Amino acid sequence: MHQFNSTSQLRGAPLSDNGSDNVWGVRLLLLLLFIISFPTASYLWSQAQLPRGCRRTGLKGSSNLADEFNNKYARGTPDQSKGNRWKVKSLWIFPVKSCRGVELDRGTVVETGLKYDRQFSFAQWKETRNKDTPDGQKGPLQWTFITQREFPLLARVRTELWIPDPSSYQYSETLPEVQSGGVMIIKFPRQDRGWKTLQARLDAKLLGQAWESSFSVPFNPTQDQIQKSGYTWASMKIWEDSPMALNMTCCMPYELKQFLGVKNPMGLFRVDTNHHRQVFRNAPRKEQLGYQPVVGFADAYPLHILNLASVHDLANRIENGPPKLSVGRFRSNIIVTGPLTFAEDHWKRVRIGDGLYDVSCRTARCKLPNTDQITGEKHTKEPDNTLRSYRKIDEGAGGAACLGMQMVPASENGTDIRVGDTIEVLEVGEHFYQKQ
């Protein structure tokens, strides 16, 4: 009877403190299950939003530069005898000028350089002056390209390039993503903070994803897509040129402008593939190559090559600079190993794999490599100070230090290039840099 009465009392009595704890424990467990399951659902949703019929281009797995600081790369060899191969160590494209690059295992060299390289650029609407603008007179307002020189946080803007993949189960030539030659996704650190975003930030952390905002644009939109999206054509100043370019600013979130710290109106532009900028200066002429070299939004020449041993030499001379000087700071397309330090200074013509290249001139350096390409932090002096202390080697560069070489493909037809390709120097000689 006593046991029965006790049970009856429990059924009709209010919950005890222990019972209340149990209810809250269940609620907490359900909340944790939701937190764990929600990011998974978010992840699946994000996967569903990826460009249809496309694959993400870029290196799979660890970087080919993972061991770039190994001292074995500081020791080049004078020739390629006894199995000492000079070869391509790493390949890079930078789809958006001055933003983070995409590492490749292989690529295709076209007339403008590596395919997909520097086809987009951010710009700001500002007063511009040129050598013909009289002193004291204001220049006209114009879209003008921006780089890490003024806005170092561009280094933290990531690009994903998705290109059509016929092997994809979604692939169809009628898909907008396929018709535009792919899709570019641009990502940057999110700016919203506070308790309202705690859940979303936790989701990102649980999934090992960066806390980022993103937007996408067609890589090379069709005329129909241009009209439907409201893109327009406008002149964009890049150095002394002002080519027509496709204004895709309507796709760009205002948050990106805030993150970069751009005060003027800001826009996103794409190269007009029918009107590339012709390259002269040190480049060979049409009579020599059969075509006049051209670029998209690269500063001056289609390709940039850099010897890893030369970067090691610079790093070893810096006393009070970055703890480690990555070759990535110099934003080269082709990074090579094997040649002696600064042997590339005198290259005139080379073969890389099956491709022939004119080595047009040395690369005159600005202070952009002072910016860390991962954090966007800008060192006040290095490596610029040390580089200028011993690398003012070209009289034509007007006192600028030189590191790396500018190249032009010997053919405007596509040539494959791969990591591991052998480099053969066909001709050496003197260089005299010609300014823009």
Image: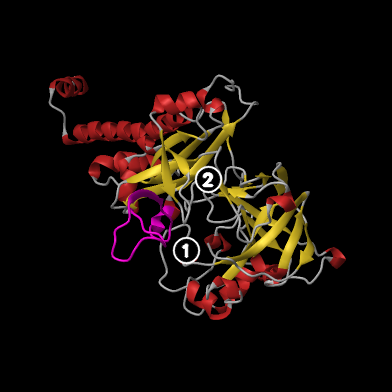
Q: Compared with residue 397, is residue 281 higher up or lower down, i.e. above or below?
A: above
Where residue 148 appears, x then y in whole percent? 43, 58
Membership of 153 in magenta stretch:
yes
Taking the image as drawn, is residue 206 in sight?
no
Residue type, mark 2 in image: Pro
Look at the image and say whether residue 183 sits in the magenta stretch: no
Relative to 50, is 75 on the left or the right? right
Q: Residue 344: x percent and y percent?
A: 69, 67
Q: Secondary structure at mark 1?
A: helix
**Which numbered dot is residue 368?**
1
Residue position marked by numbered label 2 in the rendering = 95
Q: Nearer the viewer, residue 404 or 170?
A: 404
Say which residue appears at 16% left-offset and 29% top-offset: 15
How is the protein colored in the picture?
Answer: secondary structure
Residue type at tag 1: Leu
- Residue at screen point 47% across, 53% down: 98
Give the residues drawn in magenta, as a range: 127-154
Establish if 347 lies above or below 256. Answer: below
